[in-house]
Image: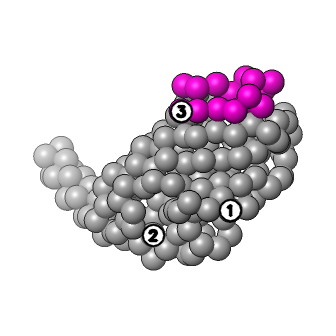
Amino acid sequence: MRSIVGRLFFVGAVFCAGATAATAQSNHFRGNACIQTVSAGCAAIGVTVGNCSTARYRPANYNGQGNSSRLSLFNPYYAQNFTLPTGSLVGATLKNVNVTQVGQSATLYTAKARIPAQVPASPVAATIYLNATIDINGFDSDAPTCNVRMRFQGQRFPL
């Protein structure tokens, strides 16, 4: 009896895993983002070169997703989300992004961001890894002159 139950469990697990994998569509990249450069305005809030965050990045129009760009940074005591409601951040132009920052309280403000380099430049459904250089001016609501350059490295999710 135990053998039959074990086999049924195995078959059920295989079918469920197959159904989940078939219906799950990759829609963003998960990884980390580390600060490479900072402006003098960052010192007041302790943002320094080498600070790293767990990160999620969704490029505009990636694999059937909407035409907006989103970067979320997660740290032990706060989180930030930078959203360009329409379009791509890839390019030389700094664009206004909506920022939601949650720490001691929730804060909404506007910053400027761009992605001067991204590999691959236009990710497709088969893209597994994505690397991007991200510039954010007005990185923190408590230090509007804090400008950073970050390096994002991520893997598509779900894989």
Front residue of this view, candidates 2 and 55: 55
Q: Earlier in the sequence, mark 3 or mark 1?
A: 3
Is residue 76 visible to us here?
yes
Residue at disc 1, secondary structure: strand
Within the image, what quadrant is residue 93 found in?
A: bottom right
Viewer-nearest of discs 1 and 2: 1
Q: Which residue is mark 3?
A: 36
Nearest to the eye among marks 3 and 2: give it: 3
Of mark 1 and mark 2, the one earlier in the sequence is 2
Which residue position holds label 2? Answer: 62
Q: Amino acid at mark 3?
A: Gln
Q: Quadrant of the C terminus?
A: bottom left
The residue carrying mark 1 is 95
Q: What residue do we see at 76% from left, 45% from top?
A: 138
51 left or right, relative to 130: right
Residue 62 magenta: no
Residue 16 pos. (x, y %): 31, 62
Q: Position of residue 89 (x, y in %)?
A: 57, 62
- Compared to 89, does 106 lie above or below? above
What residue lies at 68% left-to-right and 51% top-to-bottom? 81
Question: Which residue is more in the foreground, 48 or 24?
Answer: 48
Callout 1 touching callout 2 (CB < 8 Å): no
Whether label 3 touches label 2, CB < 8 Å: no
Identified at 53% across, 62% down, the residue is 91
What stretch of residues is rendered in magenta? 36-50
Q: Secondary structure at mark 2?
A: helix
Tell me what residue is drawn at x 70 percent, y 40 percent. 147
In the image: residue 59, left or right of residue 10: right
Amino acid beneath label 1: Lys
SS label for mark 3: strand
Where in the figure is residue 37, as x and y percent of width and height?
58, 32
